[in-house]
Amino acid sequence: MTDLYNHGTGDILTERHDNGVLQITINRPDRYNSLTLPMFEEMNQIWADVERDDQTRVVVITGAGKAFCTGMDVAQPDPTPQDALAMLETERKRVATMLRIEKPIISAINGPAVGYGLSTALLADISIAADDAVLIEGHTKVGVTAGDHAALIWPLLVGMAKTKYYVLTSEKLTGAEAERIGLVSLSVPREQVLPRALEVASQLARGSQQALRFTKRALNSWLTNAMPQHELSSALEILDFAGADYAEARQAFREKRPVDFPSARAAGGPAN
């Protein structure tokens, strides 16, 4: 690990491989690599570091232990309105930076990927998932708008019909099914996920860097042109953090009971 990436928390690790391949590992395996509020900013900073790192040609991102990343840690204290606004800005920068970085990004989805975790996995240029990994968009299940990435990337990957089904229902799908519908690039047996990702990364690192980076820039124009949709969905998600449905979802999680959304009880519609 170099000083460039040494943020000192241990929650996110970096490791350099041959040929300019950088591996990023989300490192909270005991919490299924869910993120604390400070980790959102740390991840944002790491992507900014990648962009200015002359030693890195290709990035592989994965999770420690059995999970890739299961989104925000819902066991932490409720975010304040100031926390929510700061998160909105951090997420805007994170998504924009991931799309702007010209170096290829590969996600090695070794296990469950939910919410923010699935966002990071799908915004990578190449996504390699364990065939039995569980992928869940997840936002609507906790009473918030799907704001991390869904409005931006899902329609381009799988079309609007599949997008609306999986994003509105938050139904889980496996890595194998995700490959079948075009949501991820490849699915392989779990033990092959990281080795395959590093193999592809090494192949790209030995290729024409100018050609690869210019190609990524051209293809990502489809996504950068859609950034207004992402910013709208993110803003709506932040508004939901102050709503009764989100508060009920968090309380239900703590009490280990089914969620009873107030807006589903209200005769006149959403009670937020």
Image: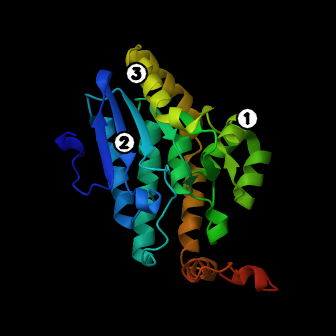
| Total numbered circles | 3
Using the numbered discs, state the Cα–Cα distance from disc 3 to disc 1 in whole angstroms.
25 Å
Q: Distance between the residues labelled 2 and 1?
A: 27 Å
Location of residue 257 with respect to 34 vertically, above or below:
below
218, above or below 140, in the image: above
Amino acid at pointer 3: Ser
Quadrant where the C terminus lies? bottom right
Coloring scheme of the render?
A: rainbow
**Residue 170 in the image: x percent, y percent?**
70, 59
**Mark 2 → mark 3, Cα distance in angstroms:** 15 Å
Residue 180 - label: 1
Q: Position of residue 154 (x, y in %)?
A: 66, 45
| Residue 47, picture quadrant | top left
How far from the left and from the top, in percent, is residue 232?
Answer: 59, 58
| Residue underneath mark 2 | 24
- To which residue does mark 3 refer? 202
Q: Which of 249 and 243 is in front in this view?
A: 249
Residue type at mark 2? Ile
Rendered location of residue 69, percent (x, y)? 49, 53
- Is residue 125 at all visible to an observer of this figure? no
Left or right of 14, for residue 151: right
| Quadrant of the image containing the N terminus | top left
Q: Residues within 10 Å of mark 3 (few under 14, many from 20)?
A: some
Q: Is mark 2 on a helix, strand or loop?
A: strand
Is any part of residue 220 visible from this angle? yes
